[in-house]
Image (tube, helix red, strand yellow):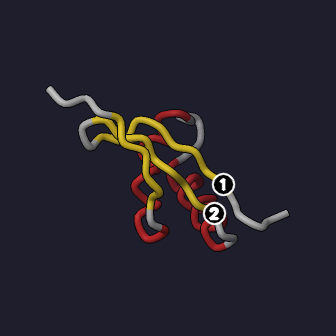
Amino acid sequence: MNTAVEIKLIPTDKLISILPLINQLNPAIPETTLKSRLDEMTSQGYQCAGMHIVGQLIGISGFWIMSK
């Protein structure tokens, strides 16, 4: 069984794929609110790296470059 961890940048057009994990970590916040916030962050240059095991997203780390 291959359980290698893979960490890679999630392309901007695929950032929606982090919502299920974000929703799991923030169950009190409606998913529509999380999506709205993600859309706003993405428009401001937000980027995100994802950690995957066997193709399943298990962690994320988001960041902005050159943003104050």
Where residue 22 sits: x, y (%)?
51, 42
Q: Residue furthest left?
A: 1
- Residue 5: x and y in percent read 35, 35
**Mark 2 touches mark 1? (CB < 8 Å):** yes
Please tell me the numbered disc located at residue 52.
none
Tag 1: residue type? Answer: Phe
Q: Which residue is mark 2?
A: 46
Q: Position of residue 66 (x, y in %)?
A: 77, 67
Residue lying farthest to the right in this orientation? 68
Left/right placement of residue 42 relative to residue 32 reads: right
On the image, numbered disc 1 is attached to which residue?
A: 63
Q: Secondary structure at mark 2?
A: loop
Q: Quadrant of residue 40?
A: bottom right
Mark pair 2, 1: CA separation: 6 Å
- For image coordinates 69% across by 60% down, the residue present is 64
In the image, 25 versus 64, the foreground residue is 64
In the picture, which quadrant includes the N terminus?
top left
Indicate the quadrant containing the C terminus: top left, top right, bottom left or bottom right.
bottom right
The residue positioned 63% from the left and 63% from the top of the image is 46
Question: Element at badge 1?
Answer: strand
Q: Nearer the viewer, residue 42 or 66?
A: 66
N-term-proximal mark, 2 vs 1 = 2
- Snapshot quadrant of residue 57: top left
In the displayed structure, 4 sits above or below 19; it is above
Is disc 1 surrounded by few (<14), some (14 to 19) or many (20+) residues within 10 Å? Answer: few
Give left or right: position of 1 versus 37: left
Three-letter amino acid code at the position of disc 2: Tyr
